[in-house]
Amino acid sequence: DSENGVPASFKVPAGVVHKIFSYKSSVIFCCSQERKIRREMADEVPSLAESKLTALVVDDNFVNQTMHHKLLDRLGIQNDVVCNGQEAVDVHCSGRNYDLILMDMEMPILNGIQATKRLREMGIESKIAGVTTRANEGDKKEFMEAGLNDFQEKPLTISKLLSILHRLDFYVQT
């Protein structure tokens, strides 16, 4: 049966349905995380603009890039965003340096572990905080041994970011 040329029913392969629900779940999760961050950001937070801190966000996920960028902006920290570890290495090769690098672990081209090792081999002394959603103890240990100064699980929030800054001696009052 059909109405106006539109089928009344049709079959959708199971894999497509899974992808649709998976995508929808990701969007719902991201929206709920953004609402949580907006609530946190409405609270009064310290401004670190006078400190002139700089940060680099290294993440292949647009939602995470945007959230981390906004969190750093909210604290008055000037920041740039790149999409993978190779871009992080390239930006440093061009002569740019940062006080803090927020490094995702799982990225294409050059992952966070590889990028952190390469940056340390290049003599980069920036504080590097690993941020990831999925890390078992072995992955976390390997990431830390690559040269991280700190590690935090996503989603990153103002309180988690302030904790990172405090532990890395960028921000003394919490």
Image (tube, rainbow, N blue to C red):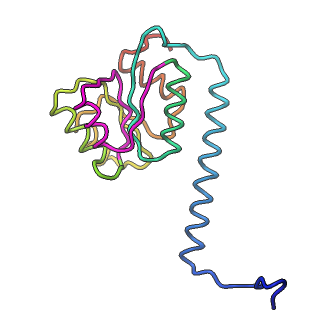
Q: Name the quadrant of the N terminus.
A: bottom right
Where is residue 151? Give x, y as percent.
37, 34
Residue depicted at 40% across the width and 38% down the height: 131
Q: Quadrant of residue 22?
A: bottom right
Q: Nearer the viewer, residue 26 or 108?
A: 108
Determine whether 128 is above or below 112 in the image: above
Q: Which residues are magenta?
A: 77-105
Q: Position of residue 56 (x, y in %)?
A: 38, 30
Rendered position, 30 above or below 70: below
Residue that extends furthest to the bottom in the rendered view of this protein: 1
The magenta stretch spans residue 131: no
Residue 87: quadrant of the picture: top left
| Residue visible at 64% across and 45% down in the picture | 31
Vertical comparison of 76 with 149: above or below: above
Reply yes or no: does residue 100 show up in magenta: yes
* Residue occupying image coordinates x 50% and y 35%: 156
Q: Is residue 156 left or right of residue 147?
A: right
